[in-house]
Image (cartoon, rainbow, N blue to C red):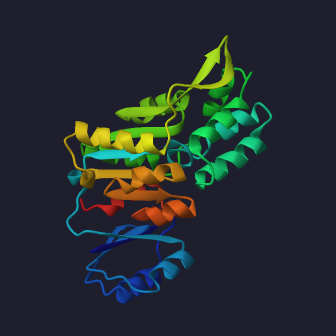
Amino acid sequence: MHLIIQGAAPISALHIEKLTRLSRARKMEPLSPQAVRLTGAQPFDDLARLCQEAELDYAFMPEGLKLTDMKVFITDMDSTLIDIECIDEIADMNGFKAEVATITEAAMRGELDFAESLRARVKLLEGLEESALSRVYEERLGLNPGAERLLAGLKAAGITTALVSGGFTFFTEKLKTRLGFDHAWANVLEIRDGKLTGQVLGEIVDARAKATRLAELCAARNAGRDQAIAIGDGANDIEMLMNARIGIAYRAKPIVREAAACALNHAGLDGILNLFES
């Protein structure tokens, strides 16, 4: 197995030497100042603790697995691809951010039914001017580190990319165009006379819907789940992550990290590219 070690900052030679020795790796290959690949590495008891103390991510990957072996990539939006929870920021413009953010956090931890929690949060947006959505996109929404490099790398490898969100189509459609996603799915906010009604149209994109979209993408590409990569941060992403070969928790809640194959707590989104051989 390969052991991929990476972080946000350059890895010290001391940490590389120690992890190489303790994992009994037969080869160390620098991938960048922030990442190394240890070939033939073995798990050892202190690995998680040492990486946590050094603010490093780690993941065991099969030797010989290339990015071009994969066919499908699917990602969550809020707090994964982007650095905000859009609904919390929209609610801030209607004076309800604290209330909505509390519900959002509980839903992402898996403590509330997602569909019910979304309807409750959207209800608090009733009467807000539609222009508030544009303000959130333009003034508050930022991409998480490495997002653009990740999408460019996936596209170069011929992978079908999709954005699937329990958030809203207003944002997913803009990001689809901006980053070149092949597909995007999210919830539709009802708007009448230029104002939000506090209602969501159609079926809500929840955990089951996310997993279904992944299965549909694999079928369309004639791919097995062993050729799929998925990434997310909340409880409503778990089913999707568990149905992909490479399920990645990004800055995720503990319940999600436990279910995912690996986690990115320090490296950027482009750290996904380091998991595969070139």
- Residue 182 horizontal/vertical position (percent): 34, 33
Q: Quadrant of residue 121?
A: top right
Image position of 248 (left or right of 133): left
Viewer-proximal residue, 113 or 12? 113
Identify the residue at image location x=24%, y=36%.
220
- Residue 52 horizontal/vertical position (percent): 54, 75
Residue 263 lies, with reference to residue 49, above or below; the image says above
Identify the residue at image location x=36%, y=84%.
20
- The answer to whether residue 234 is seen in the rendering is no
Viewer-proximal residue, 65 or 97? 97
- Residue 129 horizontal/vertical position (percent): 71, 20
Q: Quadrant of residue 274?
A: bottom left
Identify the residue at image location x=25%, y=52%.
227
Viewer-proximal residue, 141 or 232? 232
Residue 186 lies, with reference to residue 193, above or below; the image says below
- The answer to whether residue 138 is seen in the rendering is yes
Quarter placement of the N terminus: bottom left
